[in-house]
Amino acid sequence: MFTREEVPAKTVLLDEGQTAKKVYFIEKGCLRLSFNKDGKDITFQFFFEGEGVSSAESFRYNQPSLYSIESLEPSIVHTLTRKDYFEIIEASPLIREAMEEQTLQRLLYVEKLFLSRIKNSPEERYRELVEQRPEILQRVPQHYIASFLGVTSVSLSRIRNRR
């Protein structure tokens, strides 16, 4: 039921406002989630090998997505349509449980990200990133990291130079 797709870097898989028709499981590559705020591109999450991603509310409830999904690197993804996804989780309690666990892990990550944005300074957010997700620093362009941290590229450069 899965379709293997090779996706070039900088490919938009889902545009903000579109309805998500697929879920993506990453074999190779990096995807980012972003949205547009007053003409400014804001990155808020990255996904790598072994992870799955979709616009959950859009995919589940057939609503317009609140954000875009884009490849940052040449990627290989395995996609599943909405219809096939629901057939699989109905047919297999084991797969349903795995998908529920992945959804819960994503919720916990978003909770931590939300609290970090409220409680921590940009320097503290950068330190957390270094400690918890060093692969982002190695694989993601600096302007996306700055956007993710909620700072400008110049501010990120200053933070990095102070370390």
Image (tube, rainbow, N blue to C red):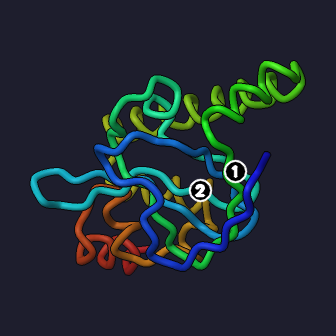
Q: Quick check: marks 2 and 1 in contact, CB under 8 Å?
A: yes
Query: Which part of the image, by quadrant, shows the C terminus?
Result: bottom left
Residue 19: x and y in percent read 40, 40
Q: Tag 2, which secondary structure?
A: strand
Going by the numbered disc 2, the residue's amino acid type is Phe
Going by the numbered disc 1, the residue's amino acid type is Glu
Question: Nearest the camera: 114 or 78?
Answer: 78
Q: Mark 2 = which residue?
A: 47
Q: Determine whether 93 is above or below 54 in the image.
A: above
| Residue drawn at the location 34% of the way across and 36% of the way down | 119
Q: Determine whether 91 is above or below 50 in the image.
A: above
| Residue drawn at the location 77% of the way across and 25% of the way down | 89
Question: Nearest the camera: 50 or 158?
Answer: 50
Q: Determine whether 147 is above or below 96 in the image.
A: below
Q: Residues within 10 Å of mark 2 (few under 14, many from 20)?
A: some
Query: Which part of the image, by quadrant, shows the N terminus?
Result: top right
Q: Which mark is residue 51?
A: 1
Residue 17 in the figure: left or right of residue 19: left
Residue 108: x and y in percent read 58, 30
| Residue drawn at the location 12% of the way across and 59% of the way down | 39
